[in-house]
């Protein structure tokens, strides 16, 4: 036999052996896969045939009647609501107390003056809320003079009756309506008040008659609790 034919025979023999080995491996793999598929199809869940079983919590439930449980729930809800309301009220109250005026400011909110100590025809000056207040006990001639003026011709038209509650008593803030100066009493061209800063003249009713001031002297809120007492504020 020649060398060429011997080599061909050897190669064919090796090829047949490899093919046989491959077929055996493939058959073994298919057999293993079939076993695995069979085992998977026959898998049994440790939780039984179904997983939708509802747990039993009966041992945790209350042994009391449903009505008793409702009463307890309502009591707890009401107590919580009451505690919340008390806390909110305290918070709002503390906030309002902190925001309100201090004691010294409230003490100046109202001022009481005894009128018996003011003689007729005289002025007094008191301090109210940090501002001077003029109080004049007017004579009858001063009242008549204030009423004789034609108020329609004034810069800030006001009758004397609109500025007083009792004609005998004129109560005004002692602050010039021009730049906030304090006028001088019983002075000026009209016998009332005169502001020396810029030359504003006010009459016996506190109305502007001459000078740069645009408005009459302001009348604060006041009342007469008795004939001899004046309360400002």
Image (cartoon, rainbow, N blue to C red):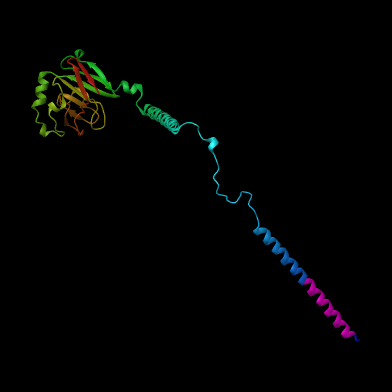
Q: Residue at x 9, y 26 (%)?
A: 147
Q: Look at the image and give the residue range highlighted in magenta.
A: 3-22
Left or right: residue 72 versus residue 220 is right
* Percent x, y of residue 35: 71, 62
- Choose between 204 and 133: the one closer to the eye: 133
* Percent x, y of residue 126: 26, 20
Q: Residue furthest top?
A: 117
- Above or below, comparing residue 10 to residue 183 in the picture: below
* Percent x, y of residue 123: 20, 19
- Above or below, comparing residue 218 to residue 11 in the picture: above
- Choose between 224 and 208: the one closer to the eye: 224
Question: Which corner quadrant holds the C terminus?
Answer: top left
Q: Is residue 14 magenta?
A: yes
Instruction: State the predominant SS element of the stretch in magenta.
Output: helix
Left or right: residue 115 versus residue 65 is left
Q: Residue at x 72, y 63 (%)?
A: 32
């Amino acid at each position: 036999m020649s060398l060429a034919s011997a080599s061909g025979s050897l190669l064919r023999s090796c090829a047949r052996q490899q093919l046989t080995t491959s077929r055996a491996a493939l058959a073994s793999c298919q057999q293993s896969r079939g076993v695995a598929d069979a085992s998977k199809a026959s898998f049994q869940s440790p939780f039984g045939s179904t997983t939708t079983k509802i747990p039993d919590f009966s041992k945790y439930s209350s042994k009391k009647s449903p009505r008793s449980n409702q009463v307890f729930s309502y009591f707890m809800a009401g107590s919580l609501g009451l505690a919340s309301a008390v806390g909110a009220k305290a918070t709002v109250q503390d906030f309002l107390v902190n925001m309100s005026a201090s004691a010294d400011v409230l003490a100046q909110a109202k001022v009481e003056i005894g009128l018996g100590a003011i003689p007729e025809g005289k002025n007094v000056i008191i301090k109210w809320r940090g501002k001077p207040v003029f109080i004049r006990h007017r004579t009858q001639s001063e009242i008549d003079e204030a009423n004789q003026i034609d108020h329609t011709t004034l810069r800030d038209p006001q009758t004397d009756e609109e500025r007083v509650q009792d004609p005998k008593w004129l109560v005004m803030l002692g602050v010039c309506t021009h730049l906030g100066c304090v006028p001088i009493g019983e002075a000026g061209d009209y016998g009332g008040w005169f502001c020396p800063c810029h030359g504003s003249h006010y009459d016996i009713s506190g109305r502007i008659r001459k000078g740069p001031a645009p408005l009459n002297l302001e009348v604060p809120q006041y009342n007469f609790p008795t004939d001899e007492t004046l309360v400002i504020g």
